[in-house]
């Protein structure tokens, strides 16, 4: 209730989780009300475009991730029950229904990530137990369930398999498994999967990024794993915990041969040098 009230009191500020850029403007779905908006990148001024059909105006987090394909924006449902495809030129929305039985079994956010690959939209299931390959020309969906079959957590306390983090390199998709110490590696051409154990047993993967041929993975127990994609060698580093919590997510932002670590419950940002395996700087009191 507290989160919902926070969103409802924030109508003058538009909240969003993902954007696409079209001709110098950013387009997004608002998280704190029902609507697609576009904003000027320079001024930041936003303009309402259209509502999503079948939902009230004050609906929260209808859609999270979005991806632009051939003049259409595909919106991945978060609390909505369908995929929305917005045609920019026609200014119209078409929806693709999801299987209601599966949706009803999901306890939280359906999808939190989306990307384009070879002209198709891919929506990565969070609580929804599949990666969806969406053909925006004929509105057909292919369910890719292989990544969920080995680690389906029927009796687990965790209601999401994947979050918003992913990287793609050489036709391979890498996803941190939120309740495991593993990273999913899936071939986007064959959908064959491998599961890389990249963190200590009690750690859980949260975010990841790639720098050159090194895959970096954040573990919620303040571990940072460096996995060499060529040699498959693993180095794990302890990162300072300057919070009162034993577990915390973090976001990894790569920069040249370094990575900036935004720990979710800290105001300080760590700069980690990949070559030396050392923290070389810290930005303090960052206002999120």
Image (spheres, rainbow, N blue to C red):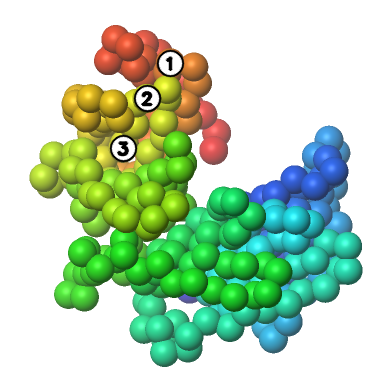
Separation of marks 2 and 1 at Cα, in angstroms: 11 Å
Residue 215 place in picture, x, y as percent: 34, 31
Tell me which residue sits at (77%, 74%) in the image: 93
Q: Quadrant of residue 271?
A: top left
Residue most extreme to the right: 90
Marks 2, 3: nearer the viewer: 2
Residue that label 3 marks = 218
Name above or below for residue 133 compared with residue 140. Answer: above
Q: Residue at x 83, y 35 (%)?
A: 42
The residue most toward the left is 201
Could you tell me which secondary element the residue under label 2 belongs to? loop
**Which residue appears at 85% of the width and 43% of the height?**
23
- From this view, report whether residue 287 is shown above or below residue 120: above
Residue in view at x 48 percent, y 85 percent: 99
Secondary structure state at the residue bearing disc 3: strand
Residue 63 pos. (x, y %): 60, 67
Residue 122 in view here: yes
Front position in the image: 183 or 221: 183
- Which residue is more in the foreground, 258 or 30? 258
Task: Please name whichever residue, 141 or 157, is drawn nearer the observer in this view of the structure.
Answer: 141
Name the quadrant containing residue 25. top right
Describe residue 122's horizontal placement relative to residue 158 as left or right.
Answer: right
Give the residue number, with chain letter if any, for mark 2.
213
Instruction: Tell me: residue 161, above or below residue 215.
Output: below
Per the image, the residue denoted by label 1 is 257
Tag 3 or tag 2, which sits nearer the N-term?
2
The residue mark sitting in front, 1 or 3, is 1
257 or 59: which is nearer to us?
A: 257
Horizontal side, residue 123 vs residue 30: left or right? left
């Amino acid at each position: 209730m507290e989160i919902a009230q926070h969103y409802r009191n924030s109508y003058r500020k538009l909240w969003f989780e993902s954007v696409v850029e079209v001709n110098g403007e950013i387009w997004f779905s608002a998280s704190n009300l029902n609507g697609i908006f576009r904003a000027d990148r320079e001024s930041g001024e936003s303009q309402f475009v259209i509502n999503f059909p079948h939902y009230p105006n004050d609906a929260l987090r209808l859609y999270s991730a979005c991806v632009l394909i051939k003049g259409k924006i595909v919106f991945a449902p978060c609390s909505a029950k369908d995929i929305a495809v917005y045609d920019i030129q026609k200014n119209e929305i078409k929806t693709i229904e999801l299987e209601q039985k599966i949706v009803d079994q999901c306890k939280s956010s359906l999808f939190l990530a989306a990307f384009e690959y070879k002209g198709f939209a891919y929506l990565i299931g969070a609580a929804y137990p599949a990666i969806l390959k969406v053909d925006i020309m004929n509105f057909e969906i292919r369910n890719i369930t292989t990544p969920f079959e080995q680690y389906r957590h029927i009796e687990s306390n965790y209601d999401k398999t994947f979050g918003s983090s992913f990287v793609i390199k050489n036709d391979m998709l890498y996803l941190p498994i939120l309740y495991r110490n593993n990273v999913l590696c899936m071939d986007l051409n064959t959908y064959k999967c491998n599961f890389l154990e990249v963190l200590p047993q009690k750690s859980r993967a949260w975010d990841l990024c790639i720098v050159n041929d090194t895959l970096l993975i954040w573990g919620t127990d303040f571990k940072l794993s460096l996995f060499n994609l060529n040699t498959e060698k693993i180095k794990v580093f302890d990162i300072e915990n300057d919070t009162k919590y034993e577990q915390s997510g973090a976001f990894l932002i790569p920069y040249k041969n370094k990575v900036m670590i935004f720990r979710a419950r800290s105001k300080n940002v760590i700069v980690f040098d990949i070559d030396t395996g050392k923290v070389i700087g810290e930005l303090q009191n960052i206002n999120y």
